[in-house]
Image (tube, rainbow, N blue to C red):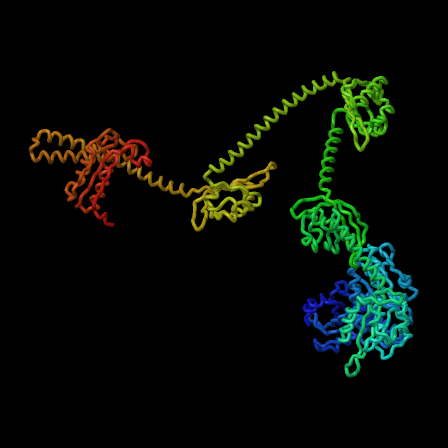
Amino acid sequence: MESLLVSDILQFADCDFIIVDSFLTIVHSNNASSINNCVTEVFPYSLVNDAIQDYLKELSHPNKKSIIHSPDDQYPYVFTIHKVTYNNSDAVLIIAKLEKKFPEIIKNIYEESYDLPYPDDANHFVDVFDYILDILIKITGMDCGGIYFLEPLTKKLKLAFAKGVSPSFIEKTSKYSADSWNYELVMKGTPQYVDYTKIELANNDFRKKEGIKAIVTVPIKIKNSLIGTINIGSHSTATISETIFPLLEAISNQIGILLDRFIVKAILAQSTIEKEKISSLHDIVYQVDKDTIIRYVSTNIKNVIGYSSSEIIGKSFVDLIHPEDLPMVMESYERVKKRIIEPLEYRLKTKDGSYRYILTISEAHFDKQGHYIGLSGIGVDIHEKKMTQIKLQESEAKFKALANSVGTAIFIIQDDILIWVNPATAMVLEYPEQEIIGKPFWIFVHPDDVEIAKERAKARQKGDDVINRYEARIITKNNTIKWIDFNITTIMYNGSIAILGSASDISYLKKIEFDLKTSEEKFYKAFHSSPIPMTINTFDDGAYREVNEAACRTFNYTPQEAIGRSIFELNVFADEEEVRNYINELRENKKVKDFNVTFRTKTGLLKDCIINSDIFISSGQKFVISSIVDVTQIKRSSQIIFEQYRELQKINKDLTKVQEELKFKNTQLFEEKERLNRILESIHDAVIVTDIHGAIVLVNNATCKLLGKDYESLIAKQVIDCVDLDCKPEFEFNFQDIVNILKHEPINRECKLHINGQLYDIELHVLPLKGATGSINGVVIILRDITQKKLIEEHIARTSKLESVGLLAAGIAHDFNNILTSIVGNLSIIKNKMSESSELYHHIKDAENASFKAKELTHQLLTFAKGGAPVKKVTSLATILKDTVTFILRGSGIQCHFNIDDSLSHVEVDEGQMAQVIQNLVINAREAMADHGVLHITAKNIDDNDPVHGIIGNDRYIQITIQDNGPGIQS
């Protein structure tokens, strides 16, 4: 057996288990406190060193086991011993389990007290008592217990069953002799309660070691003779409800009755009935033959129905049955003949003509051939109990009828469940009765009141002292919150503790109470906080009931000095005639308005005042409320007020100035913040702000665009996780290193930024953010995309080269232009000297035109050379088009068709540049048509309605179209 398997399985077992090594040390247990102790300390009465050593030698096979009983019979244990391997060493697994044996005391009762053989089925008592003990522990809220029986010979209390205590505790408490304190406690014969927390126990006392805080002992009796006790204890609480005691006593009586039943059964099982044994029993014993004739009945029948046994024997039992119950009894009789045993309640006729309820249990007898020969049984007089039950049922019916007829909500709760409600309860909750019954009561309670309601219910069911009347809120089916006045008491209902309650809807009263309370609070708040002296006096004797702080200051009395004393005792009116006039006016008019009076303060100082008084009634008593204005100090007060006003004006002015400054600063701060936000958003560079730990706290839109991520996905992320850089000179992008560098200097680098597989040229600038103390508390990172800048720089380099070429071209153009001027001049002289009809004249003219074209080329070179600018003049595009196209197409097989508006507007252009543009287009067309085809040239004015104005604007334009029909330029 592997040690892990042992631990996993046995940690949940209803037993104690230990693993012992060869040194008798406990190396593993389901009770951690036993580990590393010697086994003889845990089970000193059961195992000795030699026994374990023998088992280690003998149990050579891992699956072999041995079962032994404890050496001392007083300890009810059975031990199962296995040889196991634990941590690669031989060890012994010992499983110690309480042995559930039937107590010897019961055997003694059978054999000695009643001279009866021990019945075969008596061992069922083991399970019965085990169950009873479990139930007792649960219903008392305690956690351990035991059942003791009194040995007839030794008169010692001996433990028969135990739950929830350690083996060492069982060892100490397995027997109590007559001289022990516990024995004396049990022998008092009534339930006893002991609170160990109030008793000073020695440190080595077994009860203190076990941690028992309290016990309850309840005697077990048969025929008023004590035969044992039930002890229930608790490790966790010393508080036990007294309402549990009657229940425990009833259960102990039932245990005695249970034993009595078994004894009767043993007597009836004998072939002959011994009267002397039966006479000592509580119950009626009877035998009936197969013809319903009574053959035997115990003499105590006379105590029940008045007939003696001799008057009944020989008669049919049918004659004794109440006529109304006879059909039921005969049906049960037939079932008994079929070997069915069942309890039966019915009425027997009495000798005086009345009847009594009896409970019987009968068992059929058969001969060897299986023929029915009669029955025997026992009966119990339950008349008083039955009548009480009937009265209780009648009372309950009357109660429910009464409860159903009243308007107050009445309900019964048992185990937190509503088991009965009257119609008024349903009306209050606004639920149908069927939706209330069976539900936990707290689902109807307002959530804020649920916990205290549960606590009160739990405490009440335990028997604790709980207030019976209180107010709480409920929630109806329509989600209406109602205030309810609950009146609760504890009752026994169907044999168990229940809660009987009544509920009155006081929501309206609560609202009135709330409004009244609010009104009173407002009044008293206004009264006591008023700067005007105010008093409340009784109308009859003028005694002060309330004075506010202003009144105390005015008259130099404390509230304690004034309240309870009258205006006459304090002598506050300086003039007797004034006080008489004041009282007379108050009595006549029920109020006094602006009455001038002189008051005397506690120090004797006289003050001229104006008093206003009104009479009001509270709780059936008349009171006078007065407000008093001290006019003695009006002038002084006016001056003070004026000075204070001036001071307030100054303060107000200062406050206004401060407020304006604050407003200005706030505006500046807001503008600065807005400016910062605008600057950040207007900056095309990516700006990232982090905290001292490298977490991003702020980015601008340029950062999101550059990194291809949204704002939310960047905030709070580590910057080194979001930015992948390769820098020159080499730079390790570690945030802590960055902070260390920034302590000395800012960081400026040119880097390559990796984004989704693409590289960007980046300028990296890292600056510190410093707090008031100068320490770095953040970092500003600027990423400037210089990819385009790099391209522009390359372009500028190329442009610079072109400028040099342009300067060269300009020089050549000037020189070439000078040469062309000479050529054109000479050609013009020759042309003028020749006749136009001469063939040579036309060649000279063409040469002159070509020279002009060449001159235009030099003009273009000058224009595009450095420092050159277009030379604009007003001219006709029609002429430029025709001259240029004709010149370019001369000598080719291409036909040209011109479609030029007669009204074509003149334009202001550089003729040379314009001709060059047209030349380039025509040359392309010529090459596309391979020197043959048709070229269409169109020129027209753009009118005002042409849609093209939506693209090019509303200025005046000319549209030129050059269209060829060639296949295109060969690649």
Depth order, front residue of 101/705 = 101
Q: Please, which residue is most extreme toward the right here?
A: 179
Residue 52 percent coordinates (x, y) = 78, 74
Which residue corresponds to the image point at 32% horizontal and 32% vertical from the top-left?
A: 954
Q: Please, which residue is most extreme toward the bottom here?
A: 369
Q: 367 above or below 14?
A: below
Residue 238 visible in image: no
Residue 639 vs residue 912: left or right?
A: right
Depth order, front residue of 8/839 = 8
Residue 478 vs residue 330: left or right?
A: left
Residue 860 percent coordinates (x, y) = 24, 35
Q: 611 above or below 845?
A: above
Residue 644 vs residue 718: left or right?
A: right
Which residue corresponds to the image point at 9% horizontal and 29% vertical from the top-left?
A: 833
- Among the 4 quarters of the image, the one containing residue 414: bottom right
- Among the 4 quarters of the image, the one containing residue 366: bottom right
Residue 710 visible in image: yes
Depth order, front residue of 147/899 = 147
Residue 797 percent coordinates (x, y) = 35, 40
